[in-house]
Every structure is written in structure tokens, then in C-alpha cells.
Image: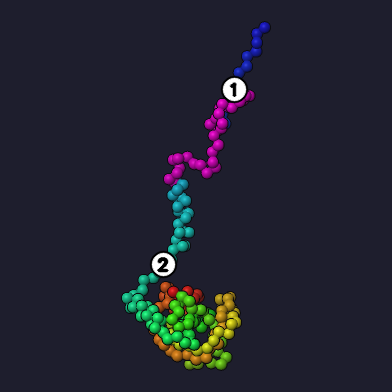
Amino acid sequence: MTRPRFSVRTIKLADAWIPKAGLSLRKPEIRSPLSLPTNMFPAVVSTRLLLLIPFILSGCQTIPTFSKEQQEARMSMEAEISREPLGDYFIGRRYYKSDYKMWGYLRRPREPWSDSRLVMFNEDRTLAPDRSGNAIGSDNGYEYKLWGKFSGESVYEPAANQFYPEFIFRRAELRNNAPGPIFADPKGLNPEERYYPNPY
């Protein structure tokens, strides 16, 4: 009797050759879904770098270059701060914004402007200098020696939709109508700019 002949056919799975009915000769190669052909690597890297550029640029801040006069004014201001006599008063910078009601920044003597607070004035007993002269915002950028106290309360400012500390204003004495810069961005002095930058 002639015995029947059996043939083994193979199919290709990945790069491994596996008998249709039998044991595999080697384990199939499992590729990562992230793997790409080598010749595509430069293009993929370039594309990924392009996608990252907006995030890189968003983390960079452009600090404007001050003029020589502004730099000298800044140095003079810092030296003056270090010599300020201690006492029960505040140093204030008036920053007028047409859309907001905050008065400006206050700090204690010898403290840096980076530690100052953006405040709302309570003028129930005494009007602020520009208001008393019926010239709102005319003292934008001026520096004052101020007397008063913080009430411990916060006042809501609707345009900014935030709360700011309340300062009960008593008296002001003009120190300088053109003091050194406390903002890295000179636009902070613009009454039409709808933001208050952080002093430095």
C-alpha cells in the first residue's frame, strides 16, 4: 500500500515563518507602535521639533532694554531704598488704569518693590491726591510717602474680577514725580493697558 504524502505549507507572520500545522521555528518579532523605518527618522524628528517650538517660545519672556538714564534711575532708587528711615508709614507708587479702581502699590520702608502689594484705597476720611485735586490719574507713576493702615479686609474690583487688600488712607507726601522703574515692562505705566505687571 502506498502511504499518503503530507506537505507542510507555511505562512508569513511578521518576519517569522510558522508552519501551518506545527511548532514555530522562531518567535515572531513584535514591533512597537512607535517604531518607524530608519529613513523616516529625520523627518519625524523635524516635525516633532516644530510642534514643540510654540511651547518653548511661550516660556521665554522678553525683557526690554532700558535706556542708560533708566538704568541709572533704577540704581539710584535701589540705593535710596536702602537708606530709607524706618517708621510707621508706607511708600506708595500710584498707577492709574482707566478701566480699574486699584490705587497702586504699597510697601514698607526698605522693602523691595517685589514685596509690595496692589491695593484699593478707602478714601472715606481723606481723598487721594489726584481725587482731591479733581484730576484723576494726573499723578500716574508718582511716588508718595503715605500714612494710613490696612483694614484687614479685601475689596472686590469688578473689572479685574478679583479682591485686593483695603488701605485706609490718611495722608500723602509727594516724594518723586519721576522715580526709577519698578516694572520690567514699560507698558505698565500705560493707563490704557488692561493689566498690572508685577514689580521687580
198 and 139: which is toward the camera: 198
Q: CA distance from mark 2 to mark 1?
A: 69 Å
Q: In which image quadrant can residue 167 be found?
A: bottom right
Among the two numbered marks 2 and 1 on one chain, the one whose residue lies closer to the N terminus = 1
Vertical order, 199 against 56 (above or below) = below
Image location (x, y in percent) of residue 53:
45, 57
The magenta stretch spans residue 63? no
Q: In which image quadrant can residue 199 be found?
A: bottom left
Vertical order, 116 against 32 (above or below) = below
Q: Which disc, if any, is residue 62?
A: 2
Look at the image and give the residue range highlighted in magenta.
14-43
Q: Exactly how many numbered labels are in the figure?
A: 2
As drawn, the residue found furthest toward the left would be: 68
- Name the residue tied to disc 1: 9
194 and 83: which is toward the camera: 83
Q: Residue at x 58, y 76 (%)?
A: 162
Q: Residue at x 47, y 62 (%)?
A: 58
Q: Marks 2 and 1: CB-CB under 8 Å?
A: no
Residue 179 visible somewhere in the drawing:
no
Instruction: Assign a secondary structure to mark 1.
Output: loop
Q: Residue at x 54, y 86 (%)?
A: 149
Image location (x, y in percent) of residue 139:
45, 86
